[in-house]
Amino acid sequence: MGVVAAVKPKDIFAADEWAALTRVSGWRGLWLVAHAWASIIAIIAIALWIGHWIAFVPAIALIGGRQLGLAILMHDAAHGLLHPKRAVNNFVGQWLTGAAVGSELTAYRTYHLAHHRYTQQAEDPDLSLSAPFPTSRASLVRKVFRDLSGQTFLKQRGAQFALAAKGLPMLLRGEAMPKGRETSAGTILNRSARDAGPAGMSAPMGAQAAVTVTKSTLRFLLVQVVLLALSLSLYGWTPYLLWLAALATSFQLALRIRNIAEHACTATGPGDPFSHARTTRANIVERALLAPYWVNFHAEHHLFMGVPAYRLARVHTMLIERGYGARMTIADNYASVLRLVTSPAV
């Protein structure tokens, strides 16, 4: 198939409007990264101050939402939108956001841009995230259980570590990854909500491509060691265990629901670009748990991927005011999306 049709910004926005919408701030992206980490620290501190295990349940849910926030901010870095200086953008996107949740900026950037180019077509590397839908409610319940019980996390990380072990000897020998394998590596490293076993994950990758997974895994483990060391030096094991519990449970579920909401049961083919991604209106609770940092404005992001996350809400308002709302796929909330993509049948 051909690439997805593009919208010309000049057909919708005046030149000065477009320049303002696409300007990358030198401080707002960094502030959002600081906000994500400060929120995680505050949530843990409040749970420890309450001092009862029952406080850990909402804490884990909220931490998972901020971990998704870190992944979203890495996504902005992949588009070069986190900071106007490329070196700062890439460092923050690699080390202060992506590595903490097990993602790798460069590999993600390569495969994610392919996702934008071929959205909802056979060549889309993310198509498998939306292709199973609609599905039965029973199937979705089973997926949710696997996420919240830690099974998804263990399967994904087990597959990642297996590939890393394969690539480690090559990394130590200084062998480079062949050109063109970044997309496969990015697919493996950034589909934490996908149900795929080790064989399914490794099949698209040659042995040398595992070098990228190895590097990403080492970064992930290094960040975990730093977080654990900080936890032990300040309070003991509990803060890190809360972080890890969220990474293994609520983060997985938030990531799955985000993936479902963005493209499941939307239009396929290279036709109208307004219909390939879904925007989901989110209340304060949904923004805390499922839609941090304006990620719910996904239709706007696909239409204009040069707009930083913190201006997507403005783009949404402008599109509605100018009469484009009827062409867009917009859901009232995340519950309505889950109802849409499921059926009572088993």
Image (cartoon, rainbow, N blue to C red):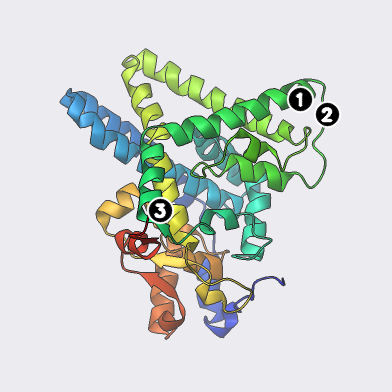
Left or right of 211 on screen, residue 156: left
| Dot 3 alpha-carbon crowd within 10 angstroms: few under 14, some 14 to 19, many 20 or more | many
The disc at residue 293 is 3
Where does label 2 land, which residue? 175
For the residues labelled 2 and 3, the Cα–Cα distance comes to 38 Å
**Apparent side of residue 322 relative to residue 165 in the rendered image (left or right):** left
What SS does tag 1 mark? helix
Q: Residue at x 29, y 29 (%)?
A: 44
Rendering coords of residue 169 (x, y %): 76, 20
Q: Look at the image and tell me whether residue 198 can be seen.
A: yes
The residue labelled by disc 1 is 171
Q: Position of residue 283 (x, y in %)?
A: 27, 59
Q: Is residue 326 above or below residue 42?
A: below
Say which of 286 and 76 sits in front: 286
Q: Nearer the viewer, mark 1 or mark 3?
A: 1
Q: Nearer the viewer, mark 2 or mark 3?
A: 2
Quadrant of the rendering where the C terminus is positioned? bottom left
